């Protein structure tokens, strides 16, 4: 058999305790653990076929040939998978994101999680959850958290080889009545990627050490909040984690400002909703798209408030979703 194929679907995730800084950039080992929730319906669907007749990897993103930088990143990841089984065949990869790519909506998380699952299955490997998560981590750190579903904790680990740095599900998608409302303020790919941003922050921000300290404490508190199914507590921790991460990045040299005016408007909007009794908290990743974490009962009001903000072009309503899964090949 010369063609071996598989396909997989994975969801983006949003960190409630952020990952922003590495102890080992080559292995994507984080300086601190993080916690996220999988975002249904922000999906990536990836199909792959390894073909002995093919000269080199061919990568398509959204139906068109991928740009060389992205294609090279996919090939480098596939080299890791090929090495696991001694495969020398090149692959055709087709990946589709159901949301804006490279705009701070975690497309690398869903993308590398789907690719890790599809590529290993195509080559006949059936890795367990921790091993698959640790593999996905090599493609993009946050992809480790898109292998499990629901609420996922990614341990920093202590081993130099990273084998103990993977994510695991700590609560299922239905265990907390959380909703995530995403405001799309600018769907264009961001100017500075998160890998470069976190490295500059680590190397130059005077607040970096304090940020990592805070992240470690926030993770302990957030795990307790999830265990207690305490949405309000979890939301408070998530908001402070996001603000601390952006604070550390703003203090880098030169400072990194991911936000635009509408992102700030959304922060104030979420806080105003809270003073009016809504259970809503602000978060934002390495891009300008604000997200509100809210109770299911408040989702309608939060989505309506976001939609009224002048700089918000679209609102995407998300709920906790499932882990990465194989799907029939197209
Ligand atoms: C997170 N972000 O925890 C944080 C918050 C962005 C801000 O993980 O270098 O694409 O590939 O490991 O995973 C985005 O960073 O970075 C990210 P790499 P990744 O979700």
Image (cartoon, grey):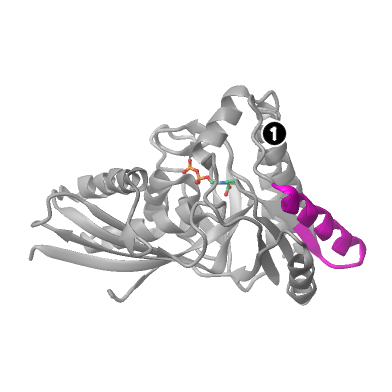
Residue at figure coordinates x 50%, y 51% from the top left: 102
Q: Position of residue 174 (x, y in %)?
A: 62, 74
Would you say 20 lies left or right of 66 here?
A: right
Stretch of the chain drawn in magenta = 260-281
Name the image quarter holding the C terminus. Answer: bottom left
Would you say 78 lies left or right of 285 here?
A: left
Residue at figure coordinates x 57%, y 24% from the top left: 203
Q: In the image, is residue 271 part of the stretch drawn in magenta? A: yes
* Above or below, 138 relative to 297: above
Q: Position of residue 56 (x, y in %)?
A: 17, 49
Residue at figure coordinates x 57%, y 57% from the top left: 187
Q: Between residues 158 and 306, which one lies in front from this camera angle?
A: 306
Q: Secondary structure beneath disc 1?
A: helix
Which is the main secondary structure of the residues drawn in magenta?
A: helix
Would you say 84 lies left or right of 172 here?
A: left
Say which quarter of the image contains residue 4: bottom left
Q: Looking at the image, how many numbered discs can be counted on the residues?
A: 1
Residue at figure coordinates x 85%, y 57% from the top left: 271
Q: Between residues 309 and 97, which one lies in front from this camera angle?
A: 309
Q: In the image, is residue 31 part of the stretch drawn in magenta? A: no
Whether residue 228 can be seen here: no
- Residue furthest right as drawn: 276
Say which quarter of the image contains residue 211: top right
Q: Position of residue 326 (x, y in %)?
A: 35, 70
* Above or below, 160 relative to 181: above
Would you say 148 lies left or right of 81 here?
A: right
Q: Between residues 272 and 209, which one lies in front from this camera angle?
A: 272
**Residue marked by disc 1:** 250
Local packing at callout 1 (Cα closer than 10 Å; few below 14, some 14-19, many 20+) is some
Whether residue 262 can be seen here: yes
Name the image quarter holding the N terminus. Answer: bottom left
């Amino acid at each position: 058999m010369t063609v071996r194929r598989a396909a997989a679907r994975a969801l983006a995730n949003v960190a409630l305790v952020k990952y922003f800084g590495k102890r080992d950039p080559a292995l994507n080992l984080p300086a601190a653990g993080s916690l996220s929730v999988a975002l249904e319906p922000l999906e990536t669907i990836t199909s792959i076929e390894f073909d002995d007749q093919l000269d080199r990897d061919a990568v398509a993103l959204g139906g068109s040939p991928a740009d060389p930088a992205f294609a090279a990143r996919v090939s480098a990841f596939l080299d890791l998978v090929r090495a696991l089984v001694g495969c020398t065949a090149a692959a055709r990869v087709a990946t589709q994101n159901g949301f804006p790519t490279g705009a701070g909506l975690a497309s690398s998380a869903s993308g590398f999680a789907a690719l890790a699952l599809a590529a290993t299955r195509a080559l006949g490997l059936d890795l367990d959850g921790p091993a698959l998560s640790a593999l996905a981590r090599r493609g993009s750190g946050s992809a480790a958290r898109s292998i499990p579903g629901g609420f996922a904790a990614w341990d920093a680990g202590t081993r130099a080889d990273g084998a103990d740095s993977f994510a695991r599900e700590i609560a299922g998608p239905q265990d907390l009545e959380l909703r995530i409302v995403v405001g799309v303020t600018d769907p264009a790919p961001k100017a500075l990627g998160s890998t470069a941003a976190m490295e500059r922050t680590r190397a130059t921000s005077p607040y970096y050490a304090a940020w990592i300290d805070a992240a470690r404490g926030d993770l302990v508190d957030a795990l307790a909040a999830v265990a207690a199914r305490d949405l309000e507590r979890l939301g408070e921790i998530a908001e402070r984690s996001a603000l601390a991460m952006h604070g550390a990045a703003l203090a880098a040299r030169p400072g990194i400002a991911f936000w635009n005016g509408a992102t700030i408007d959304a922060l104030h909007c979420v806080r105003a909703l809270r003073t009016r009794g809504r259970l809503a908290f602000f978060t934002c990743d390495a891009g300008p798209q604000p997200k509100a974490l809210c109770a299911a009962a408040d989702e309608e009001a939060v989505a309506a408030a976001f939609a009224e903000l002048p700089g918000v072009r679209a609102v995407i309503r998300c709920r906790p979703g499932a882990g990465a899964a194989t799907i029939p090949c197209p």
